Image: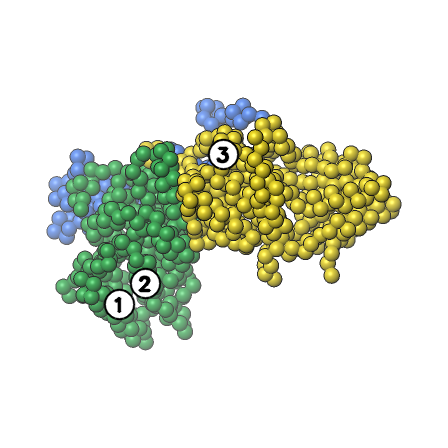
Amino acid sequence: MKRSEEVKKNKEGCLLISWRNLPCGAILTDTKKIRENKTGAWRSYRPIYDEKKCIQCLSCWIYCPDSSIIVKDGKVVGINYDYCKGCGICASVCPKKVQAIKMEKEKK
Amino acid sequence: MKKIVAKTGNEALAFAMKQIAPDVVAAYPITPSTEVVYTFSSFVADGEVDTEFVAVESEHSAISACIAAAACGARAMTATASQGLALMHEMLFIASALRLPIVMAVVNRTLSAPLNIHCDHSDSLASRDSGWIQLFCANSQEAYDTLIQAVRIAEECYLPVMVTIDGFILSHCMERIEVLSDEEVKDFIKEFKPNYSLLDVDNPITVGPACLPDSYFEHKRAVAEAMRESLPVIEKVSREFGERFGRYYDIMEGYETKDCEVAIIAMGSTYETATVAVDNLREKGEKVGVFKLKTFRPFPHQKILKELREIPVLGVLDRAEPLSSYGGILYTEIRAVLADEKKKPLTASYIYGLGGREITPEEIEEVFEELFLIKEKGKSKEEVGYIGVK
Amino acid sequence: MASLKELVKRKELFSYGHRACAGCGEVLAVRQVLLAAGENVACAMPTGCLEIVSTIYPHTAWQVPIFHSAFENAAATIAGMESAYRALKRRGKITKEIKFIAFGGDGGTYDIGFQALSGAIERRHRFLYVCTDNQAYMNTGIQRSSATPSFADTTTSPAGKKLPGKLQPRKDIVEIVIAHDVPYAAQTTVAFWNDLVTKVEKALSYDGPTFINILVPCPLGWVYPTDRTIEISRLAVETNFWPLYEYENGVYRLNYEPKERKPIEEWLKMQGRFRHLFLPENQKLIEEFQREVDERFARLKRRVAMSG
C-alpha cells in the first residue's frame, strides 16, 4: 500500500498525524514550528521595561535564557511576552543605578 | 574472468568491506570478529581504501559513531560479536528507529557467563527485536556475497542490516571464495543516497527528538512497516545479484526437501553439516531433508508457511538457549506461524552447539531417527531436546 | 573577542519556545555558546534536560543541526559526525567548513559519558565538548553525580539526621581532560559571558579536541529563586569556588582573580541545597568546605605559576 494514498486530512485539509505521514526516522526539519510553544503562559511575574531609563548595556539580552529581549538595530526595545517565562534575570542584571526593568506580579 | 581466492570467513568479510569502501568504519576488537577489523585497518594503512577508520574505545562507541556518521549521510559499517553486540544493544534500537542503513558483520559467539569465545547464536538472537534485518550465512562465500547485498538492502529500506557468520567455524576457516572485481561491487552497491544529513548546515535538522505518547507509537509503527516492506527488497536484491554474478540465495532454502517425510531447519553453518547427514540417510533410502533459514529478520512467515506446511515432521534446531523453559527461539516462532494451519508438521525443538560445542552429521542423523519415531507416534515432542549435551 | 554589540547582531541559534525551567542556566549557556560559534556548526547532545526541553517532537529549538542519540555517547556521536565529515570532505561530497560541538551535562560528561569522552579526546577528533555543569542529574529529579560538591543535598545524597548530604568532594573534570594533553581546555560560567564567548572562540580555532566546563546554576536543583541565576554564577567565581581559568598549549592562565575572595558561606547560603549547613552543629562543615575551596584554588595558582 502506498503511504500517500492513506494520508488522512481533517476538515480543514490539514494532515493528521499518522504513522503513514511521519518523517522517516522522526527527524525534525521545521526549525520555526517551536514558536507554537508560547511559554509566556508560564509566567507569574512580568518584567516591565522602561525604554527611557535604559542605557542599552544589553545585559538583559545576553543573560536571557529564553531569548525574549526584543532587540532592533542592536538596541533593546522591549520584551517578548509570548515566550518570556518571567524568571526575573533581566531585572536582576539591569544595573542597580538604572533599573530599567522591574518585575510585577502577573494579573490572572 | 572469475577470480578465486583462499580466505577465512573474516578475511572474506573484510575484503568485501574494502570493496564496498564505506565512508566510515568505527570498530572495536572482539574475538572472533577482530580479524575483520584488523584486516580492514591494514587495507586503510596500505592506502587500498580511503575509508575513515575510527578505532573506538568500546563497541558502544563503535555503533554510536556509525549511527552518527550515517546520520551525517555517510555510509558506515562495523563488525562485532557476542559481548560487543550485547554492549551495543541499546544503540541497535536507535539505529533502526532513526532509519539509518548501517551494515554490520556479526561473527556469532555465545554470551557470558561462563566466558566462552566460541560459536552459538545467542548474541544475534538476543537482539532480534531491535529492528535490524538479520541475515544468517551458511558459508563464507555466502557471507561475502551477502555483505555486498546488505549495503543495497539497507540503503533501499533505510534499515540497518546484520550479516552473520558462525564464529571460528566459518570466521577462522579457510575457504575457496569467488570474489567480484572492485568495479562490479561498486556498480552493484551504487551511490549512497542518504535519507537526511546533519552536515547540511544550511538546512539544519534535529535528529533523535523526544517523542511523547502522542507520537512515539506512530514512529514505531512506521519502523514496523519498513521491516515488513524489506522482505521483497531482500528478495529483489538477492535475485539481481544472482542474475549478475550467478550465485543465487533465497530467504529460505532447502536441500532434499521435495518429497521428505521428516525435515530439520537450522540457521548458519549447521545447514551444510546437515546436508551430509541428509546424504547419508538418503543413501539408505530414508526421505529426509534440511531447510536453512537465512533471513531471520524480517521473519519470512509466508515463505515458512509455504515451505513447511506439507512436511510431516519438523525438527527445529536452535543454536541458542533462550531460558524460557519452552524451547528455542526459532522453534517458537515457527510453531506460531504454523499454529492455525489444518495441515501442519509435528514438531520438536532441539537446542545444540552452545559455546562452540561441535555438532556432527552423526548427531543430526540421530535427530532424524527421532523425528521418524515422532512420525510413528503421531505426536509432537513436548520436551526440549539437547543435542550433544553431556 | 566578539563584543555585545557584535553578538547582538548575530542570529539566535537556540530559539525561544523551548521548555526549560524559568531561569535555567543550562539553556543560557547553550545560547551563549552558539552565539559565539556562529552558524556553520553541527552539534550533538546526550539524553538529559537539554534534550528534553529543546526537542520534543514536533518542535526543535535548534537552528543548527543537532543529534541526540543516547545518554552515554555524546562524545562518540560527535566523533562519528566528525569522521563522516572528514570522509565526505576527502571524497569531495562536502566543501563547507563545519565545526563540531557536543553539549553534555555533568552526568553525561563526568559519569556515564566519561569513557566515550576520554576515547574521543584521545583519538584527536576535532570538536569542542561543552559540559554544562549543574552539578547533579537534574532531568531525573536531582540525583548526585560526581560533579556534585561536598555536602550538597540531592535526592540520592539527601541531608538527613545522620548524613549531611554528599560526603565526597566533586571530581575535577577539567584536570582530567587536561591530562589527555588537549590543546585547549577551560572553565567558565554564564555570568561571565565575555569570558565564555572568548573561550568558545579560542576552543573552536584549534584543530583538535577542546573542552569547556561551564557552571550553569539550576534554580530547581540548587533551590533558589529563578532571578538569582547570574548572581549565583558570579558569586561562584568571586568565592574562588569556580575559578575562571584556561589551559592552552601547556600553559595555565587564571582569567580572573577576585581582589578579595568572598567567603564561601555567601555562595552556600543562597542555595537551598546547602540549607542544612547553616544549622549550628554543621558550622564545621562550612569551614571544611572553605578549606577545600582554598586548597583547590591554591593548587590551581601553583599550576599557573609553574606553567607560565
Mark 1 → mark 3, Cα distance in angstroms: 60 Å
Q: Position of residue B324 (x, y in %)?
A: 68, 53
Q: Position of residue B261 (x, y in %)?
A: 82, 39
Q: Nearer the viewer, mark 1 or mark 3?
A: 3
Mark 2 → mark 3, Cα distance in angstroms: 51 Å
**Whether label 1 touches label 2, CB < 8 Å:** yes
- Amino acid type indicated by mark 2: Asp
- Using the image, determine if residue C126 lies above or below residue C220: above
**Whether label 1 touches label 3, CB < 8 Å:** no
Q: Please report the residue visible at 51 percent of the width from the left and 44 percent of the height from the top.
A: B14
| Numbered tag placed on residue C296 in the rendering | 1
Q: Chain of mark 3?
A: B
Hue used for the chain lettered B? yellow
Mark 1 → mark 2, Cα distance in angstroms: 10 Å
Hue used for the chain lettered C? green
Q: Please report the residue visible at 35 percent of the width from the left and 53 percent of the height from the top.
A: C121
State which quadrant residue B230 falls in.
top right
- Amino acid type indicated by mark 3: Asp
Hue used for the chain lettered A? blue
Secondary structure, mark 1, is helix
Which residue occupies the foreground of this view, B70 or C155?
Answer: B70
> What residue sits right under mark 3 in the picture?
B182
